[in-house]
Amino acid sequence: MEVFTDRVAVVTGGASGIGLGIARALGQRGMKLMIADLNEETIESAVRALRVEGVPAEGVRCDVSKLEDVEGLAAATLERFGAVHVLCNNAGVGLPTSSRNIKLEDWRWIIDVDLWGPIYGLKVFTPLIEAAGEGHISSTASMAGLISANKMGAYSVAKHGVVALMCALERELRSKKSSITASVLCPGPINTNISFNSLSYRPERADAVKTSTIKGRQGASIQASLESGMAPDEVGKLVVDAIENQKFWILTHPHWAKGVQRQLDALREDQSLTKA
């Protein structure tokens, strides 16, 4: 995709964190934006900030785990802007919890948001982008979608699914010589509030959480890593570069790919599993 000016982008989870960073980067290239998120106050704040920067922006509340919400997001975008050229499936949640002990309700919730969200996005928006004549679809996975980490089983399962989904989509689009391109974002530590937001939006967020998910050793380590991570605006620039230059893999921390290579080496050599 060579031209961004006056084209339309939809970014889920776009009111904060990586999503807002992506939205800013696309807006700086002249795109019109529809951002989707769960918190209406956060959406309004993000839209105001984008408009101050001169970006034509709108926002809508959308729970990406619900097909009807994603369909509503598409309808709102067409009503406001008339077309869709870029979709960034970015909304996501995650809880650092043992795969053996995590509640089934939390398994379903994480997979519904992190995997079914992008599935619904592809289902609803791909025909619209095809109708526009060209465009791009990007989904946010994680390095946890390439190598599973301790205490992140449900998140890793969902993010591995996102990687597989986008690999399949890219090969399908390429085989049919489509004018649509695809990418998958696999970030390492990024300075966002995903841990706290996940607790806020968790279906059973009440006292059962006890904030231990964040205050526990594993959760505290993850949050500290995030706070010292890359700025979301830098991630946004990487996404724009991938769209412009037709890159499939978007890695914020390319050196982490060595861990993936070690796992592949072990698979081939002695069929053991290396440490994440």
Image (spheres, rainbow, N blue to C red):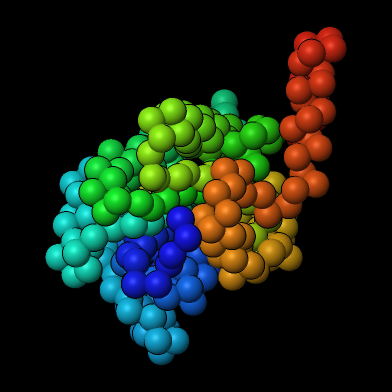
**Picture quadrant where residue 200 is located:** bottom left
Measured as percent of width and height from the top left, residue 136 is found at 42, 51
Q: Is residue 84 left or right of residue 237?
A: left
Residue at position x 28%, y 46% from top? 130
Q: Is residue 10 above or below residue 45?
A: above
Residue at position x 42%, y 75% from top? 30
Q: Nearer the viewer, residue 210 or 50?
A: 50
Residue at position x 77%, y 44% from top? 256
Q: Is residue 175 above or below residue 218?
A: above
Residue at position x 38%, y 52% from top? 135
**Picture quadrant where residue 113 is located:** top left
Residue 10 visible somewhere in the drawing? yes
Residue closest to the far right: 269
Measured as percent of width and height from the top left, residue 266 is found at 82, 18
Q: Nearer the viewer, residue 78 or 177?
A: 177
Residue 97 visible somewhere in the drawing? no
Q: Is residue 88 left or right of residue 120?
A: right
Q: Nearer the viewer, residue 91 or 176?
A: 176
Quarter of the image with the C terminus is top right
